[in-house]
Amino acid sequence: MNKQENIKCVMVINEDLPLGVIANASAILGITLGKHIPELVGKDVADASGKKHLGIITIPVPILKGNKEIIRELREKLYTSDFDDVIAVDFSDIAQSCNVYSEYLQKVSTVLEKQHTYFGIAIFGNKKKVNKLTGSMPLLR
């Protein structure tokens, strides 16, 4: 990816979900996204008392509010060739209903994409493309 001023990362979370599910979805999206953009995790640092703190992402990650329809529409757009170079991580009811990953692998293979209800989606890529998708969306508060 290019310079940091040319990239953007956002999460869009279904605001209608319970707070615990919102937190869980955000955490899962962030961990998965970090795997795919490790170069944006900064170096470890020490504070003034010499205590070590692990590096965190070096760019902001605004959390935007959506609902299941808005997130579905975003996911569909992200499957198009216009956004092939954008990283998209989604978290759905299918994933949330599974306790172990092997169960998720089995279950997801039997459910059509249009049957997924998305709880959230993380989007990373070219700033203009991300803004085109999410630029008018409000922050989740």
Image (cartoon, rainbow, N blue to C red):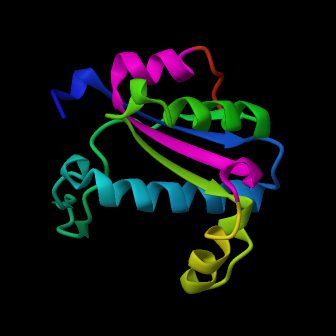
Give the extent of the magenta segment: 112-135
Q: Quadrant of residue 106?
A: bottom right
Residue 5 spot, x, y in % from top left: 24, 22
Residue 121 spot, x, y in % from top left: 57, 44
Q: Nearer the viewer, residue 77 or 139?
A: 77
Q: Nearer the viewer, residue 39 or 46?
A: 39
**Membership of 119 in magenta stretch:** yes
Quadrant of the image containing the C terminus:
top right
Residue 127 spot, x, y in % from top left: 35, 21
The tally of labels here is: 0
Tell me: residue 62, above or below residue 35: above
Q: Residue at x 63, y 68 (%)?
A: 108
Q: Nearer the viewer, residue 46 or 126?
A: 126
Q: Residue at x 83, y 43 (%)?
A: 16
Q: Quadrant of residue 84?
A: top left
Tell me: residue 54, above or below residue 89: below
Q: Specify whether 65 is left or right of 43.
A: right
Q: Is residue 134 visible?
A: yes
